Image (cartoon, rainbow, N blue to C red):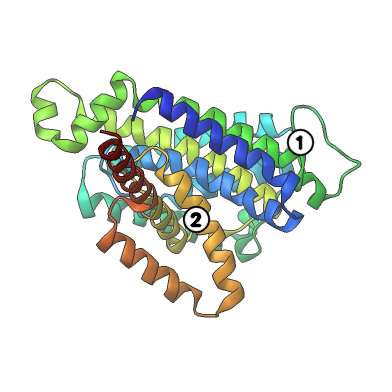
Amino acid sequence: MSDARVVLIAIAGIAALALVPIVAPPYYINLLVPFFGYAIALIGFNLLFGYTGLLSFGHAMFLGFGAYGAAVVAGTYGVRSFELVLLAVVPAAMIAAVPIGIVCVRNTGIFFGMLTLAFGMLFYSFLFKFYHLTGGDSGMRVPRLSIIGLDFAQLNKIEFLAGPFYYYCLALLVITGAVMWRIVHSPFGLHLRTIRDNARKAEYLGVHVHRFRLAAFVISAAYGAIGGVILGFRVGLADPELVYWTHSGQLVFMAVLGGASNFFGPIAGALAYTLLQDQLQSLTQYWRFVLGAVLAIIVIGFPGGIVGVLQDFFGDLRQRLARSTA
């Protein structure tokens, strides 16, 4: 895909999201706020999954780091600036990811997945059992924060989320997406793809495989923490269920649904999952069964995900147009 086409797709997507508060009712605007959190987290998750070839089954723990970190920094220490909360929480999550990553990245395949799942469940157990520190199953409250130095006190929480905070999250998605695009198209990203395709050959060429995997793991943790702060602030609560293994499964579902082989795939997957889940929950109590069926169909019939299907469709369309004009 050419750079010009990527820029056009990105501009079209940003413009469409920017128009949502103008044309859609508040319900759907608030529905899209968690989409931004998941999209940012999935951009980082896909650096590990799609570009490095490591599938984590415990990645939701970093969303938990973000949400609980925001609850501690804002609720306990009284820091009510969203930017300062991010500056405190994201480095903390990266530091916490280093020892976990050192243990995990020495393994691949199912062994890496099981280790990340184990660490995720350990963190869940800590949050659930140490009630005096974490609030247990009641969680920890995430107070209202100011953004860019403004608290928008004249707006209630719903109006704040559907207005200023929506555009703030859109800006965060654009910034983090641009940074990740630069990362995956840098020599560092090329090393990661080489490791994914053939780790042993990369090692023979002098690539420090474990170091690059660890770096990808830590970067993905930072993105997960940013997404966790958004999710925790939107609900107003950091809850242990945010870290549970089924939530990590949702991240994998979104990445596969959108297409992990494409940079924009996880973003499309997060959007599709958010809208699909909302509609299915309003239609049937068996919505999880339907989501599972959708995932099975995608994996079996369309391994490239939603973005892969769209690429194939427009590729075939261009070829037909070219043949008709020839």
* Kind of residue sitting beneath label 1: Arg
Position above or below: 282 against 85: below
* Kind of residue sitting beneath label 2: Ala
Q: CA distance from mark 2 to mark 1?
A: 32 Å
Residue at disc 2, secondary structure: helix
Residue at disc 1, secondary structure: loop
Category of crowding for the residue at label 2, using alpha-carbon neighbours closer than 10 angstroms: few (below 14), some (14–19), many (at least 20):
some
Q: Is residue 108 left or right of residue 183?
A: left
Residue lying at the far bottom in this picture: please name it: 285
Q: Is residue 74 left or right of residue 125?
A: right
Q: Is residue 210 left or right of residue 49?
A: left
At x 73%, y 45%, the residue is 21
Residue 172 or 303: which is nearer the viewer?
Answer: 303
At x 32%, y 67%, the residue is 296
At x 30%, y 35%, the residue is 325
Q: Is residue 153 left or right of residue 62?
A: right
Image quadrant for the N terminus?
top left
At x 50%, y 55%, the residue is 272
Residue 49 or 280: which is nearer the viewer?
Answer: 280
Residue 91 x %, y %: 52, 30
Pointers 2 and 1 in contact (CB under 8 A)? no
Residue lying at the far front in this picture: please name it: 325
In terms of sequence position, does the residue under pointer 2 or pointer 1 come before the other?
1
Image quadrant for the C terminus?
top left
Is residue 128 visible from the viewing direction of this image? yes
The residue beneath circle 1 is 80
The residue beneath circle 2 is 272
